[in-house]
Amino acid sequence: MRWIHGLVLLAVTGACSVEDTVAILPGTDRAGYCASGAPIRLVEDGATGREICGGLLASRVFSRALCACGELVVSAPSALDAFQGSLGPGSSGGAGASVGANGGVQLTSELKVSGSLQAGDTGLALGAGLLSVQGELRDAGRLQGASSTVRVGGDAWVAGDVELQELTVGGVLSQPVERRLTVAQPPPRVRREPVGPFAPPCSCDAPEDVGAYVKNHVAAHHNADIGLAVDALADFSGDAALELPCGRFYLTRIHGPGALLLRVTGRAALFVDGDVDVGGLDVQLDEGAELDLLVAGGVSARGPVRMGSPGFPSRLRVYVAGAFDLDAGDPWNTLPESSELAGNFYLPRAPLDLSRRVELSGAVFARRVAASAGLFIHYDLDVLGLGDRCAD
């Protein structure tokens, strides 16, 4: 493995502390950028220079553990739970991991959701199995599964017909008077009233323009401070490694047949103007480090992919404008068993067809999600509080 030429590998005076965050300041003054103590700000509008706090962007995009612009298809036992990384490992297995699917949910196995569940107009089509929702259920369509059981801890709103073997609702079931309620034992509290319309659970009609964010930082970076050429990883051979201290960095693309080790030692943002196409990828965050990775193209790898820290997934935010294929040799196995993902992944144009068991710490926002061998997501609630660090 070789380190990219000119890269500063030792600690840099004035780098961000654990309590510091990255702030965009006029020019390319990295010392001021890291020492200001203000949250990271991304240029949202290149014409006007309008900025957005990175914490607000993350808390907005990753408000649910799982969001699908299209359908969510689950055909093997799956579960989503929540924890709070800042409280340590003892907080795992808790409530608060919510799910949204603009195109509805198809379920032929067991799915446990420790937060709320919202489905679009096509509703929930359930085969023989169990759907357990610890929070609220909002269903803009039908709730159908003649041999299925649905258990909802809070209130439930269903705009269409209900046909189930068993339905338990801890709160109130609201359903239009003209819709059928076919269940052996109806819930004790049923309110016949109009339901919806609901706003889509996932903001897909106007997705975040990841490519624009990248273009807005072509000149607003600190590459010169660490001797990093913008094309340093455009065509690397063998294995390579890149270390990023506190700062904002820009690359034209990342491309090479070997594996890339990306080590982050401070509060960093990395903008990639093209694709990330590598043999393998290992993203390591030192204690207290954070990374916003924005890719204007797609991300693909032919070998093992390891990203982030399972105990602190809120510290890694990945925004990808194009495809997301972590097993480029086999498109039906997008997330191979050798991959370990701990972060928040915004993939609005990427369908995820998961034919192997996947366990991920963090959150996923994708075009479509199909899990045929089990999907287990451990949502870090700390991502919801990232916006609290932003100034008004």
Image: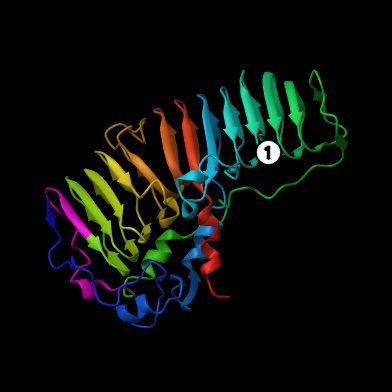
Locate residue 261 relative to residue 364 in the image: left or right: left
The residue drawn where x is 46% and y is 78% is: 49
Considering depth in this image, is 62 or 198 the residue closer to the camera?
62
Magenta span covers which residues? 221-242
Per the image, label 1 sits on a secondary structure element best described as: loop
Locate residue 1 relative to residue 358 in the image: left or right: left
Residue 27 in percent (x, y) is at 34, 82
Can you tell which quarter of the image residue 108 is in? top right
Name above or below for residue 320 compared with residue 144. Answer: below
Q: Is residue 235 magenta?
A: yes
The residue drawn where x is 59% and y is 29% is: 106
Name above or below for residue 355 compared with residue 70. Answer: above
Name above or below for residue 242 compared with residue 354. Answer: below
Q: Mark 1: which amino acid?
A: Asp
Q: Which residue is mark 1?
A: 121
The residue positioned farthest toward the front in the image shown:
90
Locate residue 116 relative to residue 365 in the image: left or right: right
Residue 331 in percent (x, y) is at 34, 33
Q: Quadrant of the C terminus?
A: bottom right
Q: Is residue 307 magenta?
A: no
The residue drawn where x is 72% and y is 47% is: 198
Whether residue 139 is visible to the viewer of this picture, yes or no, is no
